[in-house]
Amino acid sequence: MKASPIDPKRIDLVLSRHPKGAQGSLVNVLHDLQAEFRYLPKEALAKAAEHLDVPAAHLYGVATFYESFHLKPRGDHVCTVCMGTACHVRGAPRLLEQAERDLEIPSGQTTKDMQFTLEHVNCVGACALGPLVIIDGKYHGNMSPDRLSRVLGKMGKRKGSK
Ligand code: FES
């Protein structure tokens, strides 16, 4: 299944909250667009560049500079495994492998049904909780592969399920 087509009216609505040509609001505009779509669709970036009167290449440059912006569609749920040093030594690689098995996608990808995005990051500054997995913004500390599998299963995703 592909990501839904982007309704231009939703883009216009977000942009209408920001004055035309307000180049100083560029990052806020990107945040608002991402809040609306969970990523930054190229149609939205093109309209935002026009609205703010900045070159599209500049807008892309900003969008790719910040790790918090995403240029690809994301799933309804986002599972992020911390692979920073402290989490790594406490077993993060096994967590990532478990999630990849359960979701049947490699890290950095989204399931075909757009239900889950799996990703990994380097240290999010909560090392005492490691190994750490963040699911839809909620921190799950001292995670084990079994527990992660159960959490993902409860959310409707286990190897073999559709
Ligand atoms: S290494 Fe995972 S939170 Fe710091």
Image: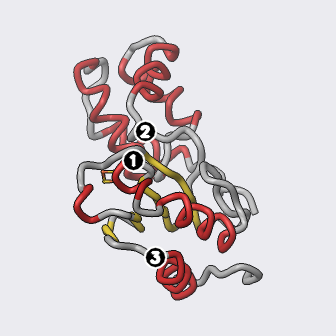
**Mark 2 close to ligand 1, CB under 8 Å:** no
Color encoding of the figure: secondary structure
The residue depicted at 52 percent of the width and 88 percent of the height is 154
Badge nearest the viewer, 3 or 2: 3
Residue 161: give x, y in percent of width and height: 73, 83
> Badges 2 and 1: C-beta atoms under 8 Å apart?
no
The residue depicted at 31 percent of the width and 26 percent of the height is 26
Q: Is residue 156 above or below residue 138?
A: below
**Which of disc 1 and disc 2 is earlier in sequence?**
2
Residue of label 2: 69
How many marks the image carries: the answer is: 3
Q: Residues within 10 Å of mark 1 (few under 14, many from 20)?
A: some
**Which of disc 1 and disc 3 is earlier in sequence?**
1
Q: Residues within 10 Å of mark 2 (few under 14, many from 20)?
A: some
Disc 3 residue type (three-letter): Ser
Q: Which mark is residue 84?
A: 1
Q: Secondary structure at mark 2?
A: loop
Could you tell me which quadrant the C terminus lies in? bottom right
Residue of label 3: 144
The residue depicted at 49 percent of the width and 62 percent of the height is 78
- Evaluate whether residue 139 shows in this view: yes
**Mark 3 close to ligand 1, CB under 8 Å:** no
* Mark pair 2, 1: CA separation: 20 Å
Q: Is residue 37 left or right of residue 84?
A: right
The residue depicted at 24 percent of the width and 49 percent of the height is 125
Disc 2 residue type (three-letter): Phe
